[in-house]
Amino acid sequence: MTKFTDLGLSPELLKAVEQAGYETPSPIQAQAIPLALAGHDILGLAQTGTGKTAAFGLPLIENLLAAGRRPAPKTVRALILAPTRELVNQIAESLRQYVKDTPLWVNLVVGGVSINRQIRMLSRGTDILVATPGRLIDLIERRAIDLGQTRHLVLDEADQMLDLGFIHALRRIAPLLGTPRQTMLFSATMPRQMNELAAAYLSNPKRIQVSTPGKAADKVRQSLHFSPQSEKTGLLKDYLDTSPDGLALVFARTKHGAEKLKKHLENAGYDAVSIHGNKSQGQRERAIRAFKSGQARILVATDVAARGIDIPDVSHVYNYDLPEVPENYVHRIGRTARAGKEGKAIAFVSATEIGYLRQIQKLMNLEISVAGGERPVEEKPAPRGGGRRHGGGFGSKKRRGNRGRRHQSAA
Ligand code: AMP
């Protein structure tokens, strides 16, 4: 088995790895670290939870230390872009742990907090900057940052950034970066656009793959429950009551839907918190802390907000709404059954979601077992924006009457 000492890292970084409590490199680390140390561009197909932050972070730090320079005011030596504030925070937290005993300085910039503080911070020069693309562009426009000395670029969770207008942002940022440049792109999925992105921004990349999206979900026990949209809240409460132990992550499709569901659960006496795009940075952090510590048992989230967050002990993932993009189902259920633990994923499927279910089963190449409900006649989803009215029936009176035919094999 590969050891950290086999990878070409300096004693300083080996000490940091030891202090972080890592004993052996994860597969992506074993593959990526030697290649990145040698200066190659990397195209990595890997999900969160595989240890990819250290896979790009350790060689990045090593290369910056080897170059031995200090950053000039306003400049940045290495730039890491990630889709969400949570992921940026998490990456910066890991990197700060690894650079603890080095002279390197890690900064982070995200939206939703004061830009003036960030401008002041950046004025001193930064070795590694972790940023969301939107805030970075604001800072570039205010001339608070100079990327001309930036020789390392990491694009993390690049597929998720695609959904957030990332190509447009990258087109603006990339020409400002220094050359030559080492670029590492990590993505959980490789849609066609990702290959185009790699072709445009990476040069002769080494491809690394640690597991296919479908594989990551092997350990998760999946089931589905057919239910009219208006009865899903009652059904969720039934499931929560049946499995009162462990942490439950509940996915809703829209910010509005997530907030409404969380409020309903709270009013019904459940310890629920939520994260979605309408929450401030502080609110999101508080919610995640409460969930991680077990103070809140239920976290209601949207896909984008939950992306990249490392929450190790989720026992149940509920797909309250099925995702429109089938890959997101794989990401969602990948939040449970981590680190060898048991995990269950239950999808609630309404008549308008049968098409989404079909796409998910096709992607995963499996038939998800039916835990309850009656398969409805398929209905076409309402057009985007107009379809939300379907989702409004929290706690409707009708659901009580439906309990008779609810999940027989509820897990
Ligand atoms: P990531 O995929 O980078 O978000 O990492 C997921 C989690 O695994 C984080 O909590 C890391 O601190 C942890 N981790 C990363 N590499 C290792 C390793 N080699 N051994 C044990 N834990 C690790």
Image: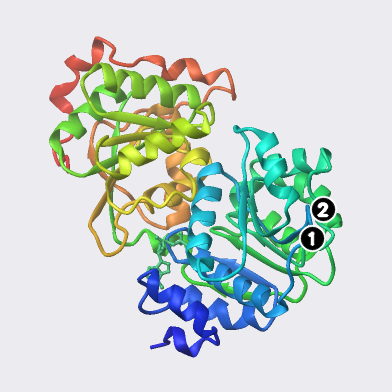
Place of residue 110 in the rendered image (x, y in percent of width and height, measured from the top left): 62, 41
Q: Earlier in the sequence, mark 2 or mark 1?
A: 1
> Can you say which quadrant of the picture contains the C terminus?
top left
Q: Quadrant of residue 128?
A: bottom right
* Residue 318 visible in the shown view: no
Q: Residues within 10 Å of mark 2 (few under 14, many from 20)?
A: many
Q: Is residue 226 visible in this depiction of the protein?
A: yes
Identify the residue at horizontal 41%, vertical 47% (top origin): 332
The residue tagged 1 is 72
Whether residues under marks 2 and 1 lie with C-beta atoms below 8 angstroms apart, the answer is yes
Q: Residue at x 82, y 53 (%)?
A: 146
Above or below residue 7? Residue 213 is above
**In this rendering, the label closer to the viewer, 2 or 1:** 1
Which labelled disc corresponds to residue 33?
none
Determine the secondary structure under disc 2: loop
Q: Is residue 56 above or below residue 263?
A: below
SS of the residue at dot 1? loop
Q: Please tell me how many numbered marks the rendered image carries.
A: 2
Rendered-image quadrant of the N terminus? bottom left
Q: Quadrant of residue 15?
A: bottom left
Tell which of 95 and 377 is nearer to you: 95
Q: In the drawing, what numbered circle is on residue 146? A: 2
Report the amino acid beneath label 2.
Asp
> Residue 273 in the image: x percent, y percent?
35, 30
Q: Nearer the viewer, residue 293 or 164?
A: 293
- Horizontal side of residue 199 vs 102, given as left or right: right
- Which amino acid type is marked by label 1? Ala
